Image: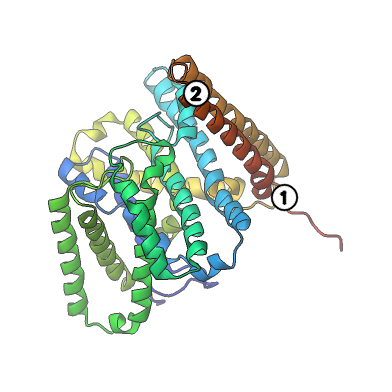
Amino acid sequence: MRPNNALQSGGSRIVWIDQVKGIAFFFVILGHLSLQPTLKSWVFSFHMPIFFFATGCTYNIDKILRTSFKDYLLKLSKRMLIPYVWMQLLSVVLRYLVFARIKHKEVPMTAYLRGIFIGNNNLVEAPSNPLYFVLLLFLAELVLFLLVRLSQGDRKKLAVFCGVLLPFSLLSQKVSLPWHINAVPAVIAMILLGHLLMQLYLRNRETLEALEPTVRFALIGALFSVGVLLWFFNGRFSLHGNKYGDDFLCAIAAAICTSVALALAVMRLPPLRILTFVGKNTLFYMGLHKPVILVFEALFPVWKERQWFVWVTAVVVYLLLIPAVLLCEKFAPFVLGRESSRNGVAARVCEVLCVVGATCVPYLFFVNHFRDGLLRSNLPLSLLAVLLYAAAVTGCWFLCKKVLRFPFLPKEETAA
C-alpha cells in the first residue's frame, strides 16, 4: 500500500496534506452547526488555522522569486477570486430556496450583492459567510509575495517583516474591515509557520518515520493534550471576528499542537480517497457547505434539537457536496477555478455575468451608503469612498478583461 506521506501521481500534491484538510473540513462543518458551545470553542481553536498551515507547507519561496507579480496576480485571481464570485452566486440561489420557498420570508438580495463585495459578514451579510477565508487567503498570499520579493527570499528577513506587520492584527482585534484586511498579518504568520514546520519535517523525516508506534502514539497524545490545555486557558480563536482569545501566541501554539498531532496521525494511516477528494476541493466545500446546512436545517428543523443529530447532519452535508463537486468538474470547472476546454457558449455567458456583477456590485454599495447618510455628513469620507469606488471598478474591469476570460474561453486549436 502506498504510504500516506508520498506524493500523488505527477508529484504535484502530498497525500497526507490533502488527507489532513479533508479531516479538518469535517470539523469546519461541525463548527457551523448547533454544536455544544464548549466543543464548538475547541473546534474553532484549530479548524481554520490548519488550512493556513497547510498553505505554508506547500509554499515555494524559490518559485515565487522566479514569478512576476502580474503572473502571480493572474494565477491567484483565477484560483480564488473567480470561484469566490461563482460560489457566492450559487449560495444566493440556495438562500433563496431557504428564505423565499421554505420559510416564506423576504430575501435581502441587495444586501447579498453588497455582502459579496464587502466580504465581511460583520458589516454586510453575504450569501456564504465562510468564503471570507478565500478573500483573506488571497490578500495574505499577495502581500506575502511582495514580502518575499522584498526580502529576496531570506527567511530571517521575512520573519522580521511579519513581526513588524503582526501588531496591526493584534491591535485591531474585534474590529471589522472589508475583506478582513486587518487579519492579513496574522494569516501571513500562520502561513510562514506552516512553511517552517514543513522544513523541519523534511529535515527530520527519516527520524519521524523510524519512530516506534508506541513512541509516535505518545507524541501525538502529548501534542493533542497540550493543544487542548492551551485552548482551555486561551479561549475561542476566530479569524472571522479577528479574535485571538486572551493571548495570540497561546492561540497559535494551540492550533499548531493540534494540527501537528493530526498530521502525525494521518501520515501513518492508509489513505482514504474521500479525504483526498475533499482535501483537493476545500475551496468548493468552504463556499457551499454553509448554504447547504441552511437548506438542510430548514427542511428538517428537528435535526437541531439533539447533539447526535448535529453529527449526523455534518456527515450528510460532507457527503452531499461530493456529487456537487463532480458535476462542477464536468460541466462548470470555472466554478472550481479550473480551465475549461469546451462549453464555449456557457463560458461567454458566465463572462458577461461577471462583467455586469463587477460593476454593479460596487455601485450598489456606494449608492446605498450615500442614501443612508453615512457619507453626506463627512466630506473627507465621501471623497475617500469615491476614490475607493473608482479603484474597485477599475480593478474589477481589469480582472474581467485580463483574467476572467482566460479560464472560461475554450482553448484555441492550432491548425495541423
Instruction: Identify the residue shown where x is 21% and y is 79%.
Output: 213
Nearer-the-camera pick, 48 or 290: 48
Report x, y in % for residue 345: 72, 40
Percent across and percent down for residue 251 are 23, 54
347 relative to 95, above or below: below
* Residue type beneath disc 2: Ser
Q: Is residue 123 left or right of residue 44?
A: right
Q: Which color scheme did the rendering employ for the protein? A: rainbow
**Residue 24 to residue 387: above or below:** below
Tag in front: 1 or 2: 2
Comparing 272 with 337, the one in front is 337
User: Which of the image's four quarters has the N terminus?
Assistant: bottom left
Q: Quadrant of residue 57?
A: bottom left
Residue 4 at least partly seen: no
Camera-side residue of 157 and 99? 157
Marks 1 and 2, the one that precedes in the sequence = 2
**Quarter of the figure with the C terminus:** bottom right
What SS does tag 1 mark?
Answer: loop
User: Image quadrant of residue 386?
Assistant: top right
Q: Does 114 sit left or right of 99 as displayed?
A: right
Q: Which mark is residue 410?
A: 1
Which residue ends up furthest to the front in the rendered image? 380
Q: What residue is shown with label 2?
A: 382
Instruction: Tell me the CA gap for discs 1 and 2.
Output: 43 Å
